[in-house]
Amino acid sequence: MEVKKEEIYVGIGTAIITVGSFFLIRKILRKTKKVKIDLSVFDSPDLKGSGQCIDSKLLAMLIDLEAQSGYPIFQWISSGIRTPYWNKKVGGVNNSSHKTPKCKAVDIKIPSITIRNHLVTLAHKIGFKRMGIANTFIHLDVDEDKSQYVAWGYPKGTLPPINPFI
């Protein structure tokens, strides 16, 4: 029985496609695994469990920010959910997106200006439309009841050191 060159090529091609498909499916399945986040990182210091109200869109965008940046975003959360009492204590604005029941904002401490600039640019790419930007932290929120495509600096009233929206 004689084997033709074409049959050999078809056999090799089929084997390559089969093996390649196996690795592609494996890679897709790894990416679709559920990410488990400890929501207590968002807790108001005066109310254990308050981080459970974190907005699902905000959470998904933060997961994406961590995955794309490679930085430990959830370890760097410095302010998540705030009770009205805690918001007042830290000098937050009266209509803060951090406050319960909105739960649509976080502050992330930043170890360097370079990392801050990278995260601001990446957050914009991911879809954040509201950012407060300081030298040591960034505020990210998904509050659609407020102006969109805005960045502000700290202290209040100053221009942001970097503005991804201009």
Image (cartoon, grey):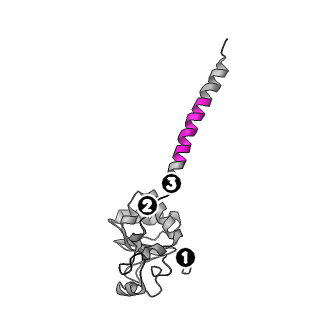
According to the picture, the residue beneath numbered tag 3 turns out to be: 33
Question: In this orientation, does residue 130 appear?
Answer: no
Q: CA distance from mark 2 to mark 1?
A: 22 Å
The amino acid type found where label 2 is placed reads Glu
**Residue 10 position within the rendered picture, expressed as x and y whole percent measured from the top left:** 65, 26
| Separation of residues labelled 2 and 3 (CA atoms) | 15 Å
Residue drawn 59% across and 34% down? 18
Give the main secondary structure, helix, strand or loop, of the magenta stretch: helix
Task: Check if mark 3's residue and mark 1's residue have beta carbons within 8 Å.
Answer: no
Q: Residue 123 in the image: x percent, y percent?
A: 47, 65
Residue at the front extreme of this rendering: 49
Q: Is residue 162 left or right of residue 112?
A: right
Q: Indicate the amino acid at tag 3.
A: Lys
Local crowd size for mark 2, using a 10 Å CA cut-off: few (<14), some (14–19), many (≥20):
some
Is 147 left, or right, of 139 in this rendering? right
Query: The disc labelled 1 sits on which kind of residue?
Result: Gln
Q: Secondary structure at mark 1?
A: loop
Q: Secondary structure at mark 3?
A: loop
- In this rendered view, identify the residue nearer to me: 135 or 144: 144
Bounds of the magenta span?
A: 14-28
Task: Calculate the distance from the C-alpha at mark 3 to the C-alpha at mark 1.
Answer: 32 Å
**Residue picked out by circle 1:** 148
Q: Earlier in the sequence, mark 2 or mark 3?
A: 3
Which mark is first along the chain, 1 or 2?
A: 2
Nearer to the camera, 142 or 125: 142
Query: Circles 2 and 3: CB distance less than 8 Å?
Result: no
Decide if residue 19 is on the left or right side of residue 84.
right
2 and 1 marks in contact (CB < 8 Å) = no
- Which quadrant: the N terminus? top right
Q: Which mark is residue 66?
A: 2
Q: Which mark is residue 46?
A: none
Q: Tell me the SS state at disc 2.
A: helix
